[in-house]
């Protein structure tokens, strides 16, 4: 164990030294190429993504500041080309300008998403120019409410409209009290959303593991009353909250309007990790004043300073707290690993689990700290090392607590057996006590099993809620996309027709502007209810696609049947009185219908495109009608 840990620490030192040398080489290359502007990005619309690091140039803004026209007019010598794996400039109060030139060579208008994958930047101004003419200006950052972002995402995502054969110049002005890291990636929308599902799965897996561990240890603490479990719960609660704050997840889901707290939460929770981790370590591996006077005093000092920094994080601005906090966290993580080594050498069996767990946690913490100080490059490994390491550490420490509890039970049982040998009357009393203890353990297992079943039921409800549109009660777009793909494969396999209806409320924007969004929500519910009345087969699916658009999938249904269902829905909505105050309003809908027997497994895009063309035809013909897609591009009106 000691050899493994020693080699691991040596490896980390070697990694840090290598990364420092690499960082020096990168900085040298930046200076040597300071007269080169950003290279133009060739975007063909078919690439899933492009890393933009080597295409970005930056310039430090002077104290008096620059206007966007001044920054745009800077000569080539004023821009510094980014060299290396990422844009990482360390901690600084200086504002930086970044320049990116994009050339759309696709031959047609395309849309791309520019992602800045560092969610703790304070202030970002985005200016875009097409052919030298200004097009748009966006302002975002973690100092602004989350709802003001153009794309609701934990990172900063900027939609770009790229006209064909024209140069699009993007200028970004970035100012932040956190580490100046600006990793940029250009995505196609489809690839970005697909990649986001994988990211969300990873995040959900990590926070799910932590949640299960918190609940498990909470139940054990309530059952046995061991205070080590309580401190451990504090530690494994503070750690994911810190990571959620650092990665923007907490800002997106927990406090989207609390911009001040969003920064301070990183300070508070990171210091709480040190506080609870230190106290738990002292109790768990018996680093007490009676056994280790010096180590216990040092640990108490680190814990006390971390507690003061956590309190100061509620009052002192982020810029003054972040560097001391990171340094203290580094000292705390390293110190706790050293405590485990000392206790292992003293023969404490609990230190085995504890030492291995802190090897993983220390690895994640050191990698994250070195990344923030720009010693290590910012990439997928450095950004997720803390999550992976902490998840493994949490599981191992839970096993260590269970092992400790089991060993204590064994020691108690052995003491009881010795007492039974000495005196018969005491043995009878102890047998009764043992039976009570066994009953308590059985009750605890039953409670854990009940809680597990409750969690399974709750997870099932959450999955149902995740697939349901909260406003209309129909399935949401995510569920529709998955079901649509499955039904397309089934129709292709069995040679059955598959029909798609795209339903759009006529003049809904005008309706919203006239009566307000609350009445508009009632309108959406009414339309959803009308759709639900005629989509009744178990295999049929009705969903809200977005805004005022709904979709209906009818498996094994030819065009004639699909038109009949669409016409029933249209007449139902047209004939329904929708009351607004004392006024009766008539609503109408337009429906595009497409039916085909797929000749390939993935026919969703073609089927949706045809139904969408039919919907546009219905709109063009005067609305309030059902139009079927004509393969010869002639829409046939089925009813009006």
Image (cartoon, rainbow, N blue to C red):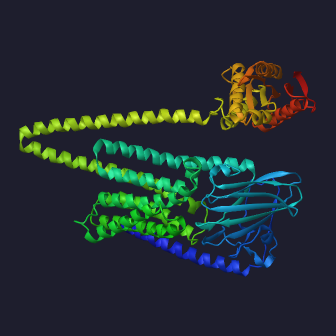
Q: Nearer the viewer, residue 491 or 244?
A: 244
| Residue 603 in sight in this render | no
Relative to 219, 534 lies left or right: right
Relative to 183, 587 lies left or right: right
Residue 324: % across, % down: 47, 70
Residue sitting at x 34%, y 50%: 229
Q: Quadrant of residue 447?
A: top left
Q: Nearer the viewer, residue 636 or 623?
A: 623
Q: Quadrant of residue 105?
A: bottom right
Name the image quarter holding the C terminus. Answer: top right
Residue 419: % across, % down: 11, 45
Residue sitting at x 43%, y 53%: 236
Residue 588: % across, % down: 80, 25
Q: Quadrant of residue 490?
A: top right
- Does 559 sit above or below residue 631? above
- Does 217 sit above or below residue 438? below
Residue sitting at x 71%, y 62%: 125
Name the image quarter holding the N terminus. Answer: bottom left
| Residue 459 in sight in this render | yes
Relative to 392, 381 lies left or right: right
Residue 217: % across, % down: 37, 46
Q: Nearer the viewer, residue 348 or 545?
A: 545
């Amino acid at each position: 164990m000691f050899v493994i840990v020693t080699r691991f620490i040596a490896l980390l030192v070697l990694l840090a030294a290598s990364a420092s040398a690499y960082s020096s080489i990168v900085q040298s290359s930046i200076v040597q190429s300071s007269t080169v502007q950003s290279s133009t990005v060739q975007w063909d619309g078919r690439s899933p993504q492009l890393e933009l690091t080597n295409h970005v140039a930056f310039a430090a803004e002077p104290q008096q500041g620059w206007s966007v026209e001044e920054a745009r007019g800077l000569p080539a010598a004023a821009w510094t080309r980014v060299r290396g794996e990422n844009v990482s400039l360390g901690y600084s109060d200086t504002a930086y300008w970044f320049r990116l030139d994009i050339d759309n060579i696709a031959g047609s208008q395309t849309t791309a998403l520019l992602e800045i994958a560092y969610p703790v930047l304070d202030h970002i101004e985005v200016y875009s120019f097409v052919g030298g003419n200004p097009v748009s200006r966006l302002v975002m950052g973690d100092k602004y409410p989350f709802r003001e972002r153009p794309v609701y995402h934990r990172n900063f995502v900027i939609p770009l409209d790229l006209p064909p054969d024209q140069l699009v110049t993007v200028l970004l002005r970035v100012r932040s009290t956190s580490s100046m890291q600006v990793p940029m990636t250009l995505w196609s929308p489809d690839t970005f959303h697909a990649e986001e599902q994988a990211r969300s799965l990873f995040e959900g897996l990590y926070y799910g593991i932590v949640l299960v561990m918190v609940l498990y240890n909470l139940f054990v603490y309530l059952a046995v009353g061991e205070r080590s479990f309580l401190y451990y719960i504090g530690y494994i609660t503070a750690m994911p909250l810190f990571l959620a704050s650092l990665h923007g997840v907490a800002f997106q889901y927990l406090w989207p309007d609390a911009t001040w707290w969003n920064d301070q939460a990183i300070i508070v929770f990171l210091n709480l990790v040190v506080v609870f981790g230190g106290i738990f370590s002292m109790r768990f591996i018996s680093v007490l004043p009676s056994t280790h006077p010096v180590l216990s005093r040092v640990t108490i000092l680190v814990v006390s300073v971390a507690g003061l920094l956590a309190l100061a994080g509620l009052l002192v601005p982020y810029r003054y707290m972040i560097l001391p906090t990171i340094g203290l966290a580094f000292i705390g993580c390293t110190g706790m690993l050293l405590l485990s080594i000392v206790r292992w050498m003293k023969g404490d069996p609990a230190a085995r689990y504890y030492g291995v767990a802190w090897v993983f946690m220390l690895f994640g913490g050191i990698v994250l700290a070195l990344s923030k100080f720009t010693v290590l490059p910012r990439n997928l490994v450095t950004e997720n090392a803390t999550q992976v390491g902490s998840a493994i550490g949490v599981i191992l420490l839970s096993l260590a607590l269970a092992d400790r509890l089991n060993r204590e039970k064994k020691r108690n049982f052995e003491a009881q057996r010795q007492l039974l040998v000495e005196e018969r009357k005491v043995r009878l009393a102890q047998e009764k006590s043992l039976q009570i203890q066994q009953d308590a353990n059985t009750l605890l297992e039953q409670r854990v099993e009940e809680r597990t079943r409750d969690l399974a039921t709750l997870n099932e409800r959450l999955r149902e809620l995740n697939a349901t549109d909260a406003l209309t009660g129909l399935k949401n777009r995510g569920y529709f996309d998955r079901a649509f793909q499955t039904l397309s494969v089934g129709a292709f396999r069995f040679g059955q027709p598959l029909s798609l209806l795209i339903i759009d409320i006529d003049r809904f924007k005008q309706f919203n502007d006239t009566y307000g969004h609350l009445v508009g929500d009632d309108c959406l519910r009414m339309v959803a209810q009308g759709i639900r009345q005629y989509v009744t087969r178990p295999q049929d699916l009705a969903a809200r696609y977005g805004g005022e658009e709904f979709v209906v999938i009818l498996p094994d249904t030819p065009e004639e049947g699909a038109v009949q269902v669409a016409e029933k829905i249209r007449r139902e909505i047209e004939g329904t009185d929708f009351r607004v105050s004392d006024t009766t309003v008539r609503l109408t809908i337009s429906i595009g219908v497409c039916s085909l027997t797929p000749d390939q497994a993935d026919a969703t895009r073609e089927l949706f495109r045809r139904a969408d063309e039919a919907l546009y035809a219905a709109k063009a013909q005067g609305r309030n009608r059902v139009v079927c897609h004509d393969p010869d591009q002639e829409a046939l009106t089925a009813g009006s």
